[in-house]
Amino acid sequence: MHLMSRPHRSRPRIAIVDPCCGAPYDPLSLTRGGLGGTEATVLRVCATLTRDFEVRHYQATRREPLATSAGLMLPLSAGPAGADVIIVLNTWKVAVKLRKLHPEAAILLWLHIRPGRHNRKMGPALHAAGVRIICVSRSHMDWLRAFLGDGALPRTGFIYNPIADTLAPDATRRDPNRLLFASSPHKGLAEVFGRFDALRAVLPDLTLAVADPGYLRWNTGPVPKNVRFLGTLSHGALMRQMRRALCLFMPQTSFAETFGLVMAEANAVGTPVLASAALGANEEVLTPGQYLSTLDTAHLAQVIQRWQTTPPDVQANPQFRLRNVAAQWSQLLHETALCPQRAVTA
């Protein structure tokens, strides 16, 4: 495959292709709530890039075009013709197909998920198509490289998901008995219910608030006492819930986060996270003391009692701030738009 350098444009054309979104989304979706971490990340990053790039989003479920602060939202059928760089979200087969349709464009696969076992052939296919993979954390990238195994593999790197530059602790009073789970229920909520129920035998005054983005129904089994469902919250409302809680309560061992945006945001507002060690990106996103073996109820209770008396001092990791993440994306896209070949050769 031959890729030529692009002629210089003051505003390179970037196409975001989302073949799998359950509903159309735009920047207002951030205020309405019910948005997954992938979509929220895409919108926040793109809103910072529109000054230097012409950004267009192609969404599977969109029917009408919409001009927004994060770029022009279009139906998937409109196609990314004329783009200098095409960024495909999660679906490697679409990235390979687009290479055949747009041989002169640089193509990136922005991967937010862990592919299943039936996708092992994606490595050679993406390598042959000249598609570069961008993961969302170093641990995600390392896992993917191990998953793909040996042989001809695509160039792979990572850029963190962003948290807002303005997120910071405030004077909100915390409830020492209030725990918060803030994720889709398929991310281990049934297991979290079990841990919480066991903890209440030791600490009966504990309560658990559950914020569910609402984009996926999931059977979580019996609901313990002292659980309150908050429903779908806007981002601002979720941050207010985080500020009130003793901690973000995520002691599950079944779902490995590729980044864990809510954990990073919790730390940014001064809220510690109680999560499982050696799982996904937990130990990369969180500082020591926030990840542990969560199978030991007595140890969990000891940690919570200690935090009730002396909350740990946690804060935002500067690497996750939007200004730094956006700068990395801007540099990558400028270089890729000017020379697509450089983007895919190691």
Image (tube, rainbow, N blue to C red):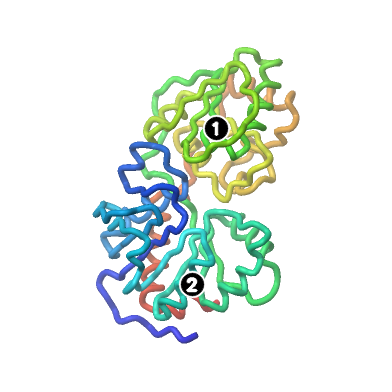
Give the total of numbered labels: 2
**In percent of the image, x 33 and y 72: which residue is there?**
81
Q: Give 164 or 191, whichever is nearer the viewer.
A: 191
Q: Residue 107: horizontal and vertical position, in percent?
A: 45, 71
Q: Residue 304: horizontal and vertical position, in percent?
A: 63, 23
Q: Image quarter for residue 287?
A: top right
Res 121 label: none
Amino acid under label 2?
A: Lys
Q: Mark 1 — residue?
A: 272
Mark 1–mark 2 Cα distance, whole angstroms, equals 43 Å
Residue neighbourhood size for the residue with mark 1, other residues' Cα within 10 Å, grouped as few (<14), some (14–19), many (≥20): many
Residue neighbourhood size for the residue with mark 2, other residues' Cα within 10 Å, grouped as few (<14), some (14–19), many (≥20): few
Q: Mark 2 — residue?
A: 97
Q: Quadrant of the C terminus?
A: bottom right
Q: Residue 141: horizontal and vertical position, in percent?
A: 59, 60
Amino acid under label 1?
A: Pro
